[in-house]
Amino acid sequence: MREIVIGGAQMGPIQKADPRAAVVERMLVLLDQAAKAGCDVVVFPELALTTFFPRWYMEDDAERDAWFETEMPNDATRPLFDRAREHGIAVSFGYAERTPDGRHFNTQILTDRTARIIGKYRKVHLPGHSEWDPDRAFQHLEKRYFEPGDLGFPVWRNLGAVMGMMICNDRRWPEAWRELGLQGVELVLFGYNTPSVNSQNAREGLAERLYHHELVVTAGAYQNATWAVAVAKAGEEDGHPLMGGSLIVDPDGMVVARTTGEGDELMVHACDMDATQFGKTTIFDFARHRRVEHYGRITSQTGVVAPE
Ligand code: ING
């Protein structure tokens, strides 16, 4: 029984005007709650330090770069690393990363219990668009502000388990899950900022968005016999609603914990990493069942090639 007590620290809205220091204060409250609950690791949302700025069209590089972190930890986040070290809790959170050579990524990191960063993931699947789109109810400019991740889908041993990360839209792509599954992942950690409505289809509302979210997270966990922790930034940011629906899902694809609101809310579950073994040695024993000789299109072809 390799039990890890996992905390999912959902965060409510962050307004455009909210300073990072105020956001980190909220994260510290959630981290202290997690310590009281006996958590070993706490997962925070995608872009946890700022509002979901890809909803805003910007042309000025300095205005855009103000949303990015150039080092981690830094003055704004050091209190978080210090408190995590005091509690002996590993943390994972997302932020906008600007590298010393000027590249921009939507990034999520993972620390060990001493607040040392042992893992970094850069979002591979960037949804949305790169130019102003007048046909959308609101913009979703991740392709404008971020480059596709260049680190692949790595895993790390941490707290005695094989952990991997993805971010938000990645969860909708089975390839992301399978890349981690083929490395024996036992715990997939990620955050998301998902608008409550579809900017291109007003008929697609909150219920359907929550359904698709639960569908892909439970499927990804089940099909790779792994635990999954999905943590929202939720609530209304400058008039734009983001959905909640944070989840902890077990290796059989069953939801074992979820948040109920759209504010700062900690969900906790004691997860036995050995519970991944049955699936990995029977129905999803990849070595015994997969037939890679028939999967060529999945990595050789990007788009659809349909018959004439
Ligand atoms: N947000 C959304 C997400 O993938 C989206 C964008 C929503 C794409 C619904 C497709 C369908 O959850 C981010 N930040 O990726």
Image (cartoon, rainbow, N blue to C red):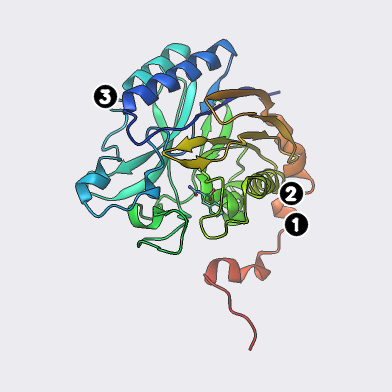
Q: Are marks 1 and 3 in contact (CB under 8 Å)?
A: no
Of 181 and 59, nearer the camera is 59
- Circle 2: residue type: Phe
Q: Where is residue 226 in the image (x, y as percent from the top left)?
A: 66, 40
- Circle 3: residue type: Asp
Q: Where is residue 237 in the image (x, y as percent from the top left)?
A: 44, 37
User: For the residue labelled by badge 1, is the local secondary structure a helix, a strand or a loop?
Assistant: helix
Q: Quadrant of residue 80?
A: top left
The residue that disc 3 covers is 75
Sequence-first disc among 1 and 2: 2
Q: In this view, does 181 lie above or below 254?
A: below
The residue at 32%/23% (across/down) is 21
Q: Is residue 242 above or below residue 296?
A: above
Residue 233 visible to an observer of this rendering: no
The residue at 30%/40% (across/down) is 67
The residue that disc 1 covers is 289
User: Callout 1: few (<14), some (14-19), or many (20+) C-alpha neighbours within 10 Å?
Assistant: few
User: For the residue labelled by badge 2, is the local secondary structure a helix, a strand or a loop?
Assistant: loop
The residue at 75%/40% (across/down) is 252
Of 121 and 61, nearer the camera is 61
User: Callout 3: few (<14), some (14-19), or many (20+) C-alpha neighbours within 10 Å?
Assistant: few
- Circle 1: residue type: His
Sequence-first disc among 1 and 3: 3
